[in-house]
Amino acid sequence: MLDLRNLALATILALATLLPTSALQAQDDARSCLAAARKSLASARGLEDEDKKAVLDEALTLFQAVGERWPDAVEERANALLEAAALLQKLARPDEARASLLAVLDLPAPGKLKARALAAAAALERRRKEPEAATALLERLIREFPDEEKEVAEARLDLGAQARDQKRWASALRLADEVIEAHPGLWRQNLEACQLRLGVLLRCRQWQQATAELERLDALMARRFKDGKHWESVARGLAALSARKSLTPLPVIDP
């Protein structure tokens, strides 16, 4: 019977049959290579230690091979760079992740993918405690890709949350208002903007204004979404606003 050490070695040797050389040779085009990378990444779930590292290394090699072997497959290359960046962050290689994201911007890729790259790079900079770099990336997203509505709205929300955390209250309110006014069809982002706006007012102890604003936003969201397919989700989101709990009076009684 194999002991645990030999069993681990046998597992690694079995995984070796799936390592990059043979996996790459099996790919006919950029799309199949990208699919193989995703499959390899998914197969790492539940593995540990060396087994997991071997599979993640294979996935990373496959992602990176998309651009190396099929340079004209622009959309697949952009997606591979985005997904490789996410994997590199999991592997605690942030500099390489940042380079992978910024490489997307050099491709003639669809605007949505470039906007996603900028958003991911900004999130990486926030984790690195570089708020000014994150702000510059988000502002670039808004400026250069105005037609990517969802990404622009989320960039404004990220900027607003950053302003709130820096106690730049007026800027945070302005950015929340921009989301509500400029993106009336995006229900999730509208709810986040409501929470951002109300949260700032509460942190500034503007109790009366916050109470009036909660009533106004409830009515506005109902007008926008009550007749649409997302109303149940919107209604649940409104009911769950943390500001609502803070602004709801409690009865002055003994329990």
Image (cartoon, rainbow, N blue to C red):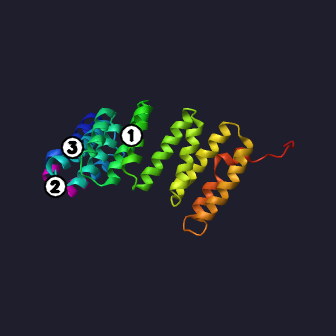
- Asked if 225 appears above or below 118 in the picture, the reply is below
Q: Is residue 1 visible?
A: no
Q: Which amino acid does label 1 sit on?
A: Leu
Residue at 37% in and 51% down:
145
Q: What residue type is labelled 3?
A: Thr
Q: Which mark is residue 61?
A: 3
Q: Name the residue under label 1.
A: 137
- The quarter holding residue 30 reads bottom left
Q: Where residue 201 sits: x, y (%)?
A: 66, 41
Q: Is residue 26 visible?
A: yes
Q: Earlier in the sequence, mark 3 or mark 2?
A: 2
Residue at 27% in and 50% down:
78
Instruction: Answer whether residue 218 is magenta in the image.
Output: no
| Helix, strand or loop under label 2 | loop
- The quarter holding residue 150 reads bottom left
Magenta extent: 23-36
The residue mark sitting in front, 1 or 2, is: 1
Q: What residue type is labelled 2?
A: Gln
Estimate the spatial distance between the alpha carbons at disc 1 and disc 2, rounded to whole Å.
35 Å
Q: Mark 2 points at which residue?
A: 27
Instruction: Answer whether residue 31 is magenta in the image.
Output: yes
Estimate the spatial distance between the alpha carbons at disc 3 and disc 1, rounded to whole Å.
28 Å
| Helix, strand or loop under label 3 | helix
